[in-house]
Image (cartoon, grey):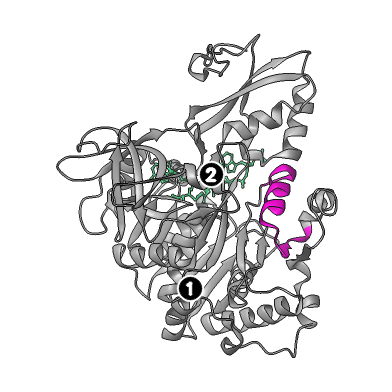
Amino acid sequence: MNLLTLFAIGRERRPDKTAIEFKDTRGPLGAQELTFSGLQREVERWAAAFVRMGVQKGDRVGLYLCNRPEFVIAYLAALEVGAIMVPINLRYRRRELSHILNDAEPALLIIEDEHWPVLDEIVGIEIGPGLTVLSVDRSESWLEEADGKEWTSASRPLTRGEETALIMYTSGTTGASKGAVLTHNHVLATVTGLLSAWAWQADDVLLLPLPLFHTHGLVVGLHCALAMGATVRLRTGFDATETVKTLSSGAATLFFAVPTIYTRLVDFLAEAEEVPSFASMRLFCSGSAPLPAEIHNAFERLTGKRILERYGMTETGMNFSNPYAGPRVAGTVGTPLPGVFARIVDAAGQDLPAGEEGELLLRGSNVFDEYWRAPQKTAESFVRDELGNRWFLTGDLARMDPLSGYVTLLGRRHELIISGGLNIYPREVEEMLTTFPGIEEAAVVGEPDAEWGEAPVAYLVCSCEIDEVDLERYCRGQLASYKLPRRLRFVGALPRNAMGKVQKHLLPRGDVE
Ligand code: MCA
Ligand code: AMP
């Protein structure tokens, strides 16, 4: 089976039902609705255009798009022609884009008109030839050229489950992000696990403000809905007023979000004159970062709904979930999803008894096999047990409750900062900062933040006075703005150990200006 055959089950259940109801919460794109059969017609039109442009099976198709129906159409069209979709975070700027385009080498990149300036800076300069860039805002012109060229399901090349569907870039400890290669089977495992664990139904309606370029919005949200034949209310972004209105009007049954969104909803509802009823809502889920227990409890107090917290990774899809029917325990991520195997081990790789803290290792049909063109990084990310099974080293520290078997995540082995559900690797920001004239050394650490969970703070050693406005302008051109340090702290030197390694725990937190 491949993803398209899975989605056909959902589509054929009720082809005239709404698949995507889209609204641009920020304005210019307006609103649009597509039925399952209407969506498929568009997908076939786009697939014909892709083939006409020379896209072949196994080619990569990059999507640098906000949430909009064309994202879904382009993705499914890429799968139709046997291509591999590479979603790109829309906030990525020159450095991140250049890296991904050079690494994934897509044959085709689909963008919006507003992104021409950043692409003009790099295409043909930092990016070699062979890349066709198309704007979705001019799709009619390139789609018309392919009109008359028929594409039907019979035109599809044979795609087996073990072939690649997606390459998803995830922050790398070495500074540059790496592509997790996900086959159809990997994604199918997560989707089928979630459909049963969360009791998805064809009548479900999911409100989805999360970006489609990450696992949470794409796999957990869009894929499950397409597979089930459920409706997605797709939004360009999160807006508390609109979310509360939609969820309380009976127009949705499911809502998936990151903790920062729940924090904002709690603040919004706490200030509301009257908290509306969310009677139609069957499930509120949280993931991508730890949900603070006080937000979990405050949300329940305000709405009468208990959030279900789950745990996943780009490389593995979804791993653990609190139960749909059964106690949802704040501060835990529950138990392994169907088909997921987990171990908690000590520094020597030995299994630990329940109750003890160690690194979480994972195995299962959902777990990826490799990073794109990075055999060394792949090799470092897995260990084998005595039976020869390959276990993925998640880098997440965890403890299992000896009685319930529920797992609590305690932190990470690496330095990853998670801000509002988005990953920031300090090394990448540090490397960028030291390319600014006058900055000799930089150390970036995460500090607790009430809104974002964590926020990056930079410690800088400089050889001259730094103009902070210039520095900010420079950083914004290079990296996604959520990675920018929220605070700068100027220090005479970075604390180092005898090996010269920066000892971040010795940095003078919060008391240097
Ligand atoms: C936006 N900004 C942020 C963040 N998001 N700053 C820090 N952390 C963030 N997460 C900054 C922007 O850079 C911008 O800065 C300013 O806020 C306004 O941007 P805007 O788009 O209006 O922000 P927002 O709409 O308020 O976004 C907040 C958000 C969003 C809704 C919480 O960050 C979001 O959707 N996060 C979820 C991401 C996600 O889906 N993660 C899942 C990854 P400036 O104005 O200075 O430019 S998948 C995963 O983790 C695994 C697999 C899993 O388990 O799910
Ligand atoms: P990503 O690299 O974007 O795929 O993010 C994966 C990481 O997000 C995991 O390794 C965890 O550290 C973190 N994560 C995801 N869900 C949760 C959760 N419910 N609680 C705590 N951390 C989480």
**At 78% from the left edge and 21% from the top edge, which residue is drawn?**
467
| Disc number for residue 377 | 2
Is residue 385 positioned above or below 112 on the image? Answer: above
As drawn, is 163 to the left or to the right of 318? Answer: right
| Disc number for residue 3 | 1
User: In the rendered structure, which segment of residues is drawn in magenta?
Assistant: 92-113
Mark 1 vs ligand 1: CB below 8 Å: no
Is 102 covered by the magenta stretch? yes
- Binning the other alpha carbons within 10 Å of mark 1 as few (below 14), some (14 to 19) or many (20 upward) gives many
Is 94 covered by the magenta stretch? yes
User: 264 or 401, which is in the foreground?
Assistant: 401
Element class at badge 2:
helix
Residue 127 is situated, as x and y percent measured from the top left of the image, at 79, 52
Comparing labels 2 and 1, the label whose residue is closer to the camera: 2
Mark 1: amino acid: Leu
Element class at badge 1:
helix
Residue 438 is situated, as x and y percent measured from the top left of the image, at 78, 19
Residue 433 is situated, as x and y percent measured from the top left of the image, at 70, 28
**At 39% from the left edge and 39% from the top edge, which residue is drawn?**
396
As drawn, is 460 to the left or to the right of 345? Answer: right
